[in-house]
Amino acid sequence: MNNISQEDYLTAIYRNLDDSGEIKPNLLASKLEISNAAVTDMLRKLSRDGFVDYQKYKSIKLTSEGESYAKNMLRRHRIWEVFLHQTLGMPWDKVHDEAEKLEHSSSDEIINLLEEFLDYPEVDPHGYPIPDKNGKMKKNKAVMAITELSENESAKVIRVNDDVKNLLSYITKIGITLGKEIFIKDKLEYDGSVLIVIDKKEINVSSKIASNIFVEKIK
Amino acid sequence: MNNISQEDYLTAIYRNLDDSGEIKPNLLASKLEISNAAVTDMLRKLSRDGFVDYQKYKSIKLTSEGESYAKNMLRRHRIWEVFLHQTLGMPWDKVHDEAEKLEHSSSDEIINLLEEFLDYPEVDPHGYPIPDKNGKMKKNKAVMAITELSENESAKVIRVNDDVKNLLSYITKIGITLGKEIFIKDKLEYDGSVLIVIDKKEINVSSKIASNIFVEKIK
DNA sequence: TTATATTTTTAAGCTCGCTTAAATTTATAT
DNA sequence: ATATAAATTTAAGCGAGCTTAAAAATATAA
């Protein structure tokens, strides 16, 4: 229904780059929930406008211009999220969608004023770092997905993927919030799921969900 | 460059209705700074969607659905203006354009939360009343344009048209803000301009500008 | 290596909001 | 009342972003 703009493409590309800084059109299309053909179309335009390096049938890279554009959108997005959650009290599983809309309609001036008003927050409500005016982001600590932990290890939740539909509201239901401590009681080989302890309750979490919750080990 | 949506049309129609609750396509086109043809086009769509009463070559009326839609956009717009000005400290001559963008990207939920955060403001930074959730607005007091005042009358500024390009920044330069007292020293017949006294300084204001500054008489 | 599956691109066509130019209707002025 | 001016609509066309269907290229697997 709603059209997706160049800004959305750049953000989605940046969010989903692989280890070598690339992304395939097919993945991009599925993230944006549009056809591959639409992606091809837009890639030609983004390439024409100097935001991506693109050659037929090849993976996509961002140019430095494209990258700073995307980072700025991420900055806008995350600052809005902090405002919505912290100032207006909107639940953390709702702020992503709202910020997605606001980020396109706000000048850098508004964002800078908001940032000041919020006293220069470093992370958004899901634990993602907020780029500063120059695109610099705080390096994450030793962050790992729950799936990478071993049995009998304890860890603290410091980031949750906000990009996956319905993940947050489910996670909230089972009691996970930022800063919460968890304990790995068991790892099930055959389906990759993890038995974790939160607030003294035992919960089995599927590998798909566990891989989107990021923690810091506690020794 | 930027496309104007149905929402903008409805707001512009509502803002510029004449005394009998109508507006002509030509005026609408000039307010929106687009061609008459584009207006004709959109009117058919707005009519199809039940927001306006429209017949070829006739003036436009809003349906009740169109009116409540427009009022809600006005509500969004003005609440954003209050936030930008009051909370973020953005100057009153800049908030209109920024709010124009934000109003399209904000759910009613955000607006309601913002309204609460701002402690239910009654007017925007230019003195316009803010409709409540049900579309109800405080009736204005005995508001009149400066041009309607007589010589030797004093008045207090309570509203300034925010819809006219560059008007606000000019008005600010000559020292007019909400609440400021002015005195009508002279009215010049031949060009309709007014000689007013503000802060003990005498300023000649053209009729075009004076007609967009609204005041309340002081006895 | 070759057959099959998947990904990507091309082609044709849609809606939306816009433009200019020409045709038509309505308003104004003498 | 009629000529002229202004407002409005119609027509043709454009760019953006989308779709589906078919063609071409690349990846995978036997």
Image (cartoon, coloured by chain):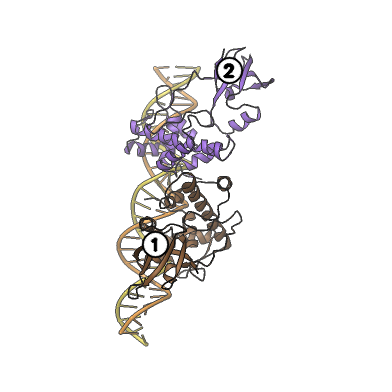
Chain colours: A purple, B brown, C orange, D yellow
Helix, strand or loop status at disc 1: strand
Instruction: Name the residue beneath numbered marker 1.
Output: B198
Q: Is residue B187 left or right of residue A97?
A: left
Nearest to the eye among marks 1 and 2: give it.
1
| Residue B32 % position (x, y) | 41, 59
Q: Is residue B29 left or right of residue A209?
A: left
Q: Which residue is mark 2?
A: A155
Residue B213: x %, y % from top left: 43, 63
Q: Which of the pair C12/B197 is nearer the observer?
A: B197
Residue C9 at x, y percent in the picture? 37, 35
As drawn, A55 above or below B123: above
Residue B162 falls in image quadrant = bottom left
Residue neighbourhood size for the residue with mark 1, other residues' Cα within 10 Å, grouped as few (<14), some (14–19), many (≥20):
some
**Could you say which is closer to the camera, residue B160 or residue A171?**
B160
- Name the quadrant containing residue B180: bottom left
Q: Residue furthest right?
A: A201
Q: Secondary structure at mark 2?
A: strand
Disc 2 marks which amino acid? Answer: Ala
How many neighbours does mark 2 have within 10 angstroms: few (below 14), some (14-19), or many (20 or more)?
Answer: many
- Quarter placement of the C terminus of chain A: top right
Cα separation, mark 1 vs mark 2, equals 66 Å
Left or right: A143, with A136 as reference point = right
Residue at mark 1 shares a chain with residue at mark 2: no
Residue at image x 44%, y 38%? A8
Q: Is residue B50 visible?
A: no
Q: Chain of mark 2?
A: A
In the image, what residue occupies the spot 47% across and 60% down? B159
Picture layout, residue B151 above or below residue B132: below
Residue lying at 36% horizontally and 58% vertically, measured from the top left: B174
Q: Chain of mark 1?
A: B
Residue found at the very far front of the displayed protein: B200
